Image: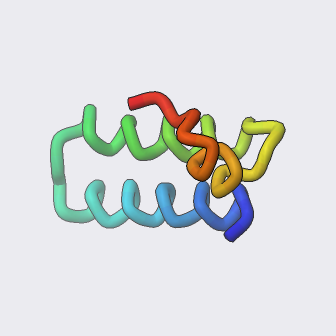
Amino acid sequence: MKNKEVAEIFRQIAEILEIQEENPFRIRAYLKAAQNVESLSRDVAEVARADELEK
């Protein structure tokens, strides 16, 4: 899965949470995750395999 695809999934989750009127901080966290994944210079799957993801 490519970074743009992963980012789009995070954005869709944020949209669903917004529709459900969930915590705005949680929504922003998913949007920020989408931005971060999209800005990676390497494929997110490669970063995950190398155990380089920050929590």
Question: Closest to the observer: 49 or 12?
Answer: 49
Kindly indicate the quadrant of the structure image that contains residue 8.
Answer: bottom right
Tell me the quarter of the picture where residue 50 sits.
top right
23 versus 4 height, above or below? above
- Counting from the top left corner in percent of width and height, residue 13 is at 38, 62
Depth order, front residue of 44/9:
44
Asked whether, in this view, residue 53 is left or right of residue 50, the answer is left
Vertically, is 25 above or below 33? above
Outermost residue on the front side: it is: 50
- What x and y, as percent, mark residue 20? 18, 63
Q: Is residue 18 shown above or below 26?
A: below
Q: Residue at x 70, y 52 (%)?
A: 46
Out of 15 and 5, give the one closest to the viewer. 5
Q: Quadrant of the C terminus?
A: top left
Q: Is residue 3 left or right of residue 30?
A: right
Residue at screen point 57% across, 48% down = 48
Colour scheme of this structure image?
Answer: rainbow
- Compared to residue 26, the image places residue 9 above or below, namely below
